[in-house]
Amino acid sequence: MFKHERVHLFVFIVLVGLQVLGVVGLLHRFELSYLPVMLVIFFLGGISTTLYLHRYLTHRGFEMPEWLKFIFASGSAIVLAGDPVMWVGDHRYHHLKSDTDEDIHSPIDGFPYAHMMWLVRKPAGFRERSKRYAADVRQIWYCRLWENSALYVLPHLFVATALFLSFGFSGMLWCLYVPMLVNYNVTWAVNSICHMSQFGYRSFDTSDQSRNNYLIGVIGLGEGFHNNHHNQPRCAAHGLRWWEFDGTRYVIWLLEKCGLAWDVVWPTSETEESEVSPSEAGAAVVISSQPETVA
C-alpha cells in the first residue's frame, strides 16, 4: 500500500540501529550472568506484544485487571514494540484489508516491504486513519500519553541505563538488544513469512493468504499459527492442535486459573478438531470455515 511512499529516514535509522545493537551484542563476549536477564526481557517483551498488544488490546479476546494491563503495556514499551494506538490501529486495518492492494504489510508487495519497510513508508495521513481504528485505545491514559515518542521511549531508556550500570556495555547489549533483535524479527515474520504460500500450511479456508508456520509459532509464543488466528481473530488461542505450541495461550490460561483473566474467548471444540497431523505441517491443508471480521 505504501511501497511507493518516500522512506522516513529517521524511523529507518532507528529501526536499523536497534537491530545493529543486537548484532553487535552477539559479537561481544557472552557471560552466563546475562542469561536470566536476557530470558526475562525476551519473555516480557514477547508476551507484552502477543498477549497485551495483540490478543487483548487489538482483539479483546479476554479481560484482565487494570494494574496487569499497565505492567504488560510497560513491557511493550521497554522493548519499543510500537506505541499501542498505532499498533492496534494498523493491525485492525490489516485484518480488514488482508492481502489486498490496500493491506499495509502484505508480501504481495515483496518480502522486505512486508517484513519491515512498511513501517518506514507510512504517509503522515495514515496515522490519523489508525487513530480512528484504535479510538477505544486512545481512551486509555498511558496509551494516549505514549503517542508522544519522547515519552514512550522513557521506559526503554530507564532499563537500558540500569543494565549498563549493572553489567556494562556488553551486558546491556546482550540483555536488552539481543532479545529485541529476536522479538522484532519474529513479530515481523508473522506479517511477511506467515502470508507467503511457500512457508507454512493452512488449516482454514480464509479469504487471505495467511499461513501457520511452526517455527515462528513456537519462537513467537504462538503468533506464527497465523492462519488459525485469521480464521477466528478474537480467539485467545492461536495454537489449536496439541502440537501447535502456543506459549501465550498457556499464559492466558494460567491467568484465568488465578482469577487474573476472565471472559476469555477460547476456541470451540469444532475449531480444535484436527485435520492436520504434525507430519503434514508443511503441506497446505484446507478445512472449510468462514473467516471472521476483526473486532
Image (tube, rainbow, N blue to C red):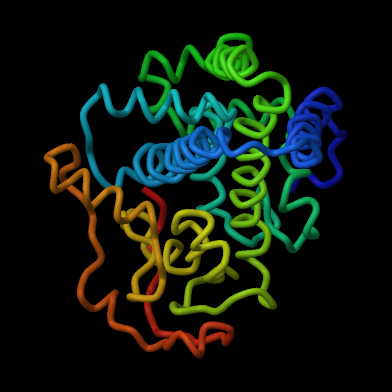
Q: Is residue 17 left or right of residue 221?
A: right
Q: Is residue 63 left or right of residue 83?
A: left
Does residue 173 lie above or below 255 as drawn? above
Front residue of this view, candidates 288 and 211: 211
Front residue of this view, candidates 243 and 4: 243
Which quadrant of the structure image shows residue 153? Answer: top right
Does residue 290 lie above or below 15 as drawn? below
Total tally of numbered discs in the picture: 0
Residue for point 41% across, 85% down: 287
Q: Is residue 70 left or right of residue 229?
A: left
Residue for point 75% across, 35% down: 25
The extreme front residue here reads 32
Does residue 54 lie above or below 227 as drawn? above
State the image coordinates of residue 129 (x, y, percent, origin top left). Answer: 58, 32
State the image coordinates of residue 81 (x, y, percent, origin top left). Answer: 57, 33
Which quadrant of the structure image shows residue 101? Answer: bottom right
Front residue of this view, candidates 75 and 159: 159
Residue for point 38% across, 73% down: 290
Does residue 289 lie above or below 170 as drawn? below
Examine the rendering and report whether any part of residue 97 can be seen: yes
State the image coordinates of residue 71 (x, y, percent, origin top left). Answer: 36, 25
State the image coordinates of residue 203 (x, y, percent, origin top left). Answer: 45, 79
Examine the rendering and report whether any part of residue 120 can be seen: no
Q: Is residue 140 left or right of residue 63?
A: right
Residue for point 39% across, 76% down: 243
